[in-house]
Amino acid sequence: MTAQTQIIIGMSTCNIAAGAQDVLHLIENRVAADGLDARVSVMGCLGMCYCEPQVKVIDPDGTAHVYTRVTPRRMERILADHVAGGQPRQPWIANFREGAEHDLMDKQQRIVLGNCGHVNPDDINDYIAREGYQALEKVLAQNDPEALIEEVQNSGLRGRGGAGFSTGLKWRFARNNRGDKNYVICNADEGDPGAFMDRTTLESDPHLVLEGMAIGAFAVGADEAYIYCRAEYPMAIARLERAIAQAEERGYLGQGILGTDFSFRVHVKEGAGAFVCGEETALIASIEGQRGMPRSRPPFPAEAGLFGKPTTINNVETWSNIPWIVRNGAAAFGALGTEKSKGTKVFALAGKIKHGGLVEVPMGITLHEIIHEIGGGTNSGRPVKAVQLGGPSGGCIPAHMFDLRIDYDEVTRTGAIMGSGGMVVMDDTTCMVDVARYFLNFTQLESCGKCTFCRVGTTRMLEILTRICEGEGVPEDIERLEHLAHQVKHTSLCGLGQSAPNPVLTTLRYFRDEYEEHIFAKHCRSGKCRNLCSYEITDNCTGCLICKKDCPVNCIEGARKQKHVIDQDACIRCGVCRDVCKFDAVIVK
Amino acid sequence: MEKIKFTLDGVAREAAKGTTILAAAKQAGKFIPTFCHLKELKPFSSCFVCVVEVKGRANLVPSCSTALADGMEIVTEGERIDQARRTCVELLLSDHEGDCLGPCMVACPAGIDIPGFIYHIAQGDDRAAHELIHHNMPLPGILGRVCTRPCEDACRRQLVEKDLAICHLKRFAADQVAASGDEYVPACAPDTGKRVAIVGAGPAGLTAAYYLQILGHACTVYDMHEKSGGMTRYGIPSYRLPRDVIERETDTIAQLGASFRYGVRMGKDVQLAELQQQYDAVFLATGAQKAKAMRVDGEDIDGVMSGIGFLEMVSRDETHRTGDVVMVVGGGNTAIDAARTALRCGAKEVSILYRRTRAEMPALAIEIDAADEEGVNIDILAAPVKIERGADGRLHVTCIRMELGEPDASGRRRPVPKPNSEHVRVVDVAISAIGQDVDASVLTGLTLTRWDSIDADLHTGETNLPGVFAGGDCVTGADIAVTAVGAGRRAAIAIDQYLNGLKVVGDVVKYNHFMGELKDVDRKSVEGFAPTPRVPMGELSAATRTRSFDEVEVGFTVEEARAEARRCMECGCRDAHECRLRTYASAFGAQQHRYTGVKRTFDRDVSHDAVVYEAHKCIQCGICVRTADELLHTASMGFTDRGIASRVKPAMARPLGDIDDTGIDQMVDNCPVGALTHKADSVPTLPSRFVRPTPRGK
């Protein structure tokens, strides 16, 4: 086969949202029409969602160039200059070579995301070409489930879904409880606002998850599995189903795998988007066709799970670590991370962050490194105020604590949780009371309604927070809120209720002055709570007219090169003027 | 069988493997509350009121679904647990709609089971109604005539058309039993050997005597008058309250064993200290007998008298003739009674002078109307400033006109004198009826309030002197009779506790959930009640009645009473006496309004023949859902929606009448609150026999 130029376009949900579909059409049309000597294929997400769509052009000599923010117009030039003309369009090429140089990649260590952007998720050959299914072959050849569990346990891998329970131990319980029928489940019900680790993994490298599950099933003695994935991830589901079919065809799944007597079938179960179904007992109920309501544990799923059978349930990221551990050994994995948190962790950087996307970093890295060195700080240029770690179940960590080393235990000490890895970055235009209200509104709406404290308690807390944000807060509200928060945290049935108060408790812990300011001074310093602030233009104003033009209610007066003034009676305090001002002339009073 | 070793509140125990903490605690005789657990069903853990502490666990754990483990250290009591349980109940209450008891019953100061007795009358069982009334109030003949009826003001029937004639029905039941010649005399507990002195034979004193006698304590009732009844006899004319009614109800109390000593005046004929020595306990119910002064020049000259003085005089001698022209000052019931009495004593012209307007008059509207009909001239916005004996020998009363200014502390607009409006009115008799004060100064040793009333606990009647209790007007100041009855009953319960050497806590106060004032009540709650006019009370014509002291109101006929009783909507909850939400709310001292916000709205499903589903009362315990699923295998009930909007609904959110109702009675029986009830069950009545209330431990 003669060497050919390869054009590989990122076709993940994030790339498509950024416009990749149009670019792909263009490439396909042009390659056919112009008779270009190039092979076109697709890849998943590289993790740099902030600069998508991305197209990778690999020269016949093997040199790869990643083009970012590719529009159809840019693509035409790339095809003409680079593919046809052999001259890469340097300015559009990301200033990192894969796996090197740039901080963004340099600080990362990719175990789970290792194949993302390097394999065509729809082609099992790509996966196999990158050591795919070698781990499964290895464990089947060794045929020693006990040793396998020992290896996973020794690696120190802890559940990446949030709770951080030892994966090896979980497997051991399941193996010890195994009966006539055992199940394995992959929890892909990713529901935190601002989290998209699982989606990207499934869309970009579905075979990795399948291989991890097959290894786990062999370890615990299961022969059937469900991947519970929310129906809002149609691309992930489609790629998974294709991958399952391909793997069965190749004998990596199905009856008598790789000539052994180990059989393993995988079903994809689509969830209807209830956040609480990410809780394992609710998830199991949902697969069984019942209302997704958590139940009290014990019994744990390892004793009595799906259809009453012993069940091993891990999330996408946990399963995705398994093949690497099997291939490279527990010691190699254990060499990464901190004493009690081994390996790497995938985080989804979202909110006011410059380099939004997915990162995979070794445990023990500081928040500062993630947010400033990898994430590039805020996209607004304003100072970072805090980061919400762990989604609506997590907590807000203030900027002054960014030297925190990320591992399960350190994060828990702050009042936040590792969670599945959502990181929502906030700048100083974010109101911390409003943030607590936002997340609590989410958990309150997503409560299954079963237990009293979660159903009614979170509602009452939300009502207090809403009152405070609207300027109706009374002095007793803080105490009342704190009391309820502790009650709900310690007296709820499942993780949803037990963690729902975390955003409230952490903002009360680190930003109590903002609560007090809302209640006593009737002031919101961030300019977010409309009843509690006003916007003013300072002498920094150059009279550039931009804010005047962008004001949705036309309440800004002023001529060119003259200081502008806001008509306070007409102002709706939307904050647009502050956002667009290039001279920091708009301030919150 | 494998045994698990654990400790429960510090005591080492053993139980079979698989036993839950809840079951183990029950075996050990420990109380753990639960809504969602039923032993026939699998553990569910939705309510979280059953939480306990397990050493080593940060969170409280639901005892209903947590199995014992070896070495488990369980704590079932303590501040943290109490607080969690109370918060749990209060959160449920904040999302609960309905009334435990009918608002009429709550409004009644004596707590009469009004829906209960009306139910009996509607069913034709007047004696049962009469006996049930006696559970809270031993003077229905008296109060059935003179009560100011706070219950009727609260009656929800007003949302349909007009309040129910509760008071008339109470009188009806009492009159029916009296007419039968077979008076209701309850059984008494065996004599305890304890003796109680009761001072005052008015409503409070009579009531206390009644219940104390039932409880086995021997009472001696002292009164300075020559007969019983207190203000009901000496302050209310006989055309409103025939004296034989008072005699009849006093006789019943005497039949129970109480003895009466009349004509004995406290501080003069007998001292409090003597009573304390001679009796095991003393109940002071001396009333508010001292007429308030008008603070007007000349009010103590001859021919000027107080309303109660006048009524008391006429009460003793109804043949008394008063002057031709009578002026009554005041706007309360006493003023109206005095004016109407003056007419019956031969006055040709009677006027009532009141300084505010008719709307502010504290007297009952029907009494004001009756006075109007009888020809009393109601002269509003006027007040006397001076009274003199004129040269013609008659009283010359200088009056001024008033107008209404800003509202005062009572919320009523303050009357202010109109300049240059002085004028003189010539009358033969002037009667001042502007209220009464308490004069407890003769009761030495007692702590008094700054209004000279007795400083006593309003719930138990305890005073600063051990064994001395007080209640009624002498504590509250002049108030209505039914309030005094309530005080007398509560004091009897407290005195009984005192005499038995128990902690004096008074009557058991149960939690009551309340939908709110009339204006706040969801009108959906009265849907389905066809407007039916209130049955009017027959009365003597205005022309004939002023010539005698014959009773003006003639009472309901049997047909009228049945028709009126059928208007009752039976407000209150069918499950009020068994509801676990109410029981725990009472036990944990929960408050209805500690947490407020969005809550369930009234949602009653009456589509099923036999069962009502009131979703606004549901606490989402899921017992009906699980009963249907696990025991009946019908899946006829299920959960819908999420968060605060989640609900238990009949399958596929259909009306209850459309579902597979196999075993629905079992679902109704298992419901821990009043969400699922049988239509055939009426609002439950109290036991009619008064027994000693058992105070709850917590």
Image: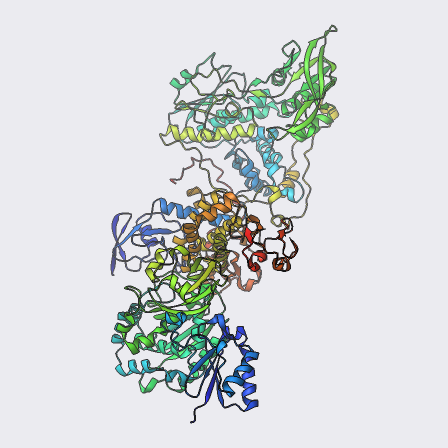
Query: Residue placed farthest to the bottom in the image?
Result: A1
Q: Is residue B679 visible?
A: no
Q: Nearer the viewer, residue A517 or B85?
A: A517
| Residue B334, image x, y percentages | 63, 22
| Residue B239, image x, y percentages | 65, 24
| Residue B301, image x, y percentages | 65, 9
Residue shown at 32% from the left, 82% from the top: A134
In the rendered view, would you say A589 is above or below A581?
above
Q: Is residue B666 visible?
A: yes
**Residue B220 lies in quadrant:** top left
Q: Quadrant of the N terminus of chain B?
A: bottom left
Give the left or right position of residue A400, taking residue B564 as reference: left
| Residue A438, image x, y percentages | 50, 57
Residue shown at 67% from the left, 11% from the top: B303
Give the left or right position of residue B6, taking residue B303 as reference: left
Q: Nearer the viewer, residue B457 or B532?
A: B457
**Residue B226 lies in quadrant:** top right
Give the left or right position of residue A51, taking residue A312 as reference: right
In the rendered view, would you say A581 is above or below A227?
above
